[in-house]
Image (spheres, rainbow, N blue to C red):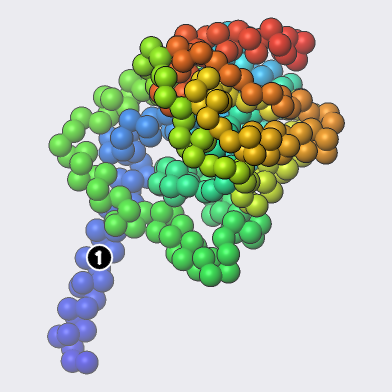
């Protein structure tokens, strides 16, 4: 290798390092300017979990069905919704862990997840949870150690995680490029302020009614729960018990068409899983009945609209009244 070629390689490495550094600074410090509007909801939730010292007697946790479907102010003035779109019990365990480092433990926690989301770690884990830097390296390491990935998948998964953690340009180039032609900051700032005003609650579907059945549930004959999600379900329950938190596991409303078209095996197996949690942990409360609603509660295939969220929250307030006091 001659001297001129060596200098060329060094300059190339420095150039790549400079570009990478610029991407990393932008991705980690200017998210409100470059990401789509969903980022604002994630950031507001993470900010609240990690920075606020406010005391809440009631927390709402789950994925987007809980974020849209339960209105904190209708339960009590000291209720907050820290659900996150696409989250599973994996994210919940670590987010509650972070929450408890900055807040007193709540008296009650309502957990609610989309019925059809127990059988996989979907794209949200990579394209939202890790993309928006919601987990620390230590937390991801624990997830790997707890069996989230097979031996064949481990190396690829760790490499993928490091690309997000180190803000690899290939992961963030599209967002930065698209942001050059859009005013994303104003949109995100408005979304962030709305999330603050609504104490974390956020609507996803806004249609006045949704008639069709939810094919992501009716398309499956059997209910299955992924081992890692089941592992963290138990860890979440035990986390609540260790911190003196009354846990309530609720079921999100589904329309009549979805319920009618679910296979009998799926209906039975899902509720058998819910009953198994209740039996193992007698101190928690698990709703082992489906919440079947009329189509005018739904704003899309799985999320409640304002009417549905209002009526559903009011029903929860009455049903569990003694756990709010």
Looking at the image, residue 73 lies above or below residue 13 = above
The residue under the point 55% across, 8% down is 311
Q: Quadrant of the N terminus?
A: bottom left
Q: Identify which residue, 286 or 201, lies in the foreground.
A: 286
Label 1 sits on a secondary structure element that is helix
Q: Identify which residue, 241 or 218, lies in the foreground.
A: 218
Quadrant in the picture for residue 8? bottom left
**Mark 1 crowdedness (10 Å alpha carbons): few <14, some 14-19, many ≥20:** few
The residue under the point 27% across, 29% down is 185
Residue 117 x %, y %: 54, 40
The residue under the point 71% across, 11% down is 319
Quadrant in the picture for residue 189? top left
Residue 98 x %, y %: 61, 38
Q: Identify which residue, 250 or 129, lies in the foreground.
A: 250
Q: Is any atom of residue 263 visible in this view? A: yes
Q: Quadrant of the C terminus?
A: top right
**Which residue in the protein does label 1 denote?**
16
Residue 251 x %, y %: 62, 25
Residue 99 x %, y %: 62, 33
The residue under the point 54% across, 37% down is 116
289 lies left or right of 144 = right
């Amino acid at each position: 290798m001659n001297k001129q070629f060596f200098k060329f390689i060094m300059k190339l490495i420095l150039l790549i390092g400079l570009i990478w550094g610029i991407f990393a600074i932008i991705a980690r410090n200017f998210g409100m300017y470059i990401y789509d509007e969903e980022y604002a909801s994630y950031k507001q939730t993470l900010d609240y979990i990690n920075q606020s010292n406010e005391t809440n007697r009631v927390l709402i946790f789950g994925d987007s069905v809980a974020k849209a479907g339960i209105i904190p102010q209708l339960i009590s003035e000291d209720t907050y919704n820290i659900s996150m779109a696409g989250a599973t019990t994996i994210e919940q365990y670590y987010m509650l862990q972070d929450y408890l480092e900055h807040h007193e433990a709540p008296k009650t926690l309502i957990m609610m997840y989309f019925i059809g989301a127990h059988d996989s770690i979907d794209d949200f884990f990579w394209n939202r949870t890790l993309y928006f830097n919601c987990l620390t390296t230590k937390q991801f390491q624990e997830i790997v150690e707890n069996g989230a990935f097979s031996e064949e998948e481990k190396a690829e998964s760790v490499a993928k995680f490091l690309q997000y953690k180190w803000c690899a340009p290939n992961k963030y180039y599209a967002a930065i490029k698209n942001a050059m032609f859009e005013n994303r900051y104003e949109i995100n700032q408005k979304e962030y302020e709305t999330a603050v005003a609504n104490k974390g609650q956020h609507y996803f579907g806004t249609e006045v009614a949704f008639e069709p059945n939810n094919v992501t549930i009716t398309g499956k004959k059997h209910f299955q729960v992924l081992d890692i999600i089941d592992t963290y379900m138990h860890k979440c329950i035990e986390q609540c018990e260790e911190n003196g938190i009354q846990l309530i596991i609720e079921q999100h409303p589904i329309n009549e068409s979805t319920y009618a078209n679910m296979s009998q095996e799926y209906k039975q197996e899902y509720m058998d899983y819910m009953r198994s949690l209740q039996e193992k942990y007698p101190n928690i409360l698990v709703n082992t009945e489906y919440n079947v609603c009329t189509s005018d509660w739904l704003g899309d295939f799985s999320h409640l609209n304002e009417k549905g969220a209002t009526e559903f929250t009011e029903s929860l307030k009455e049903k569990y009244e003694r756990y709010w006091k």
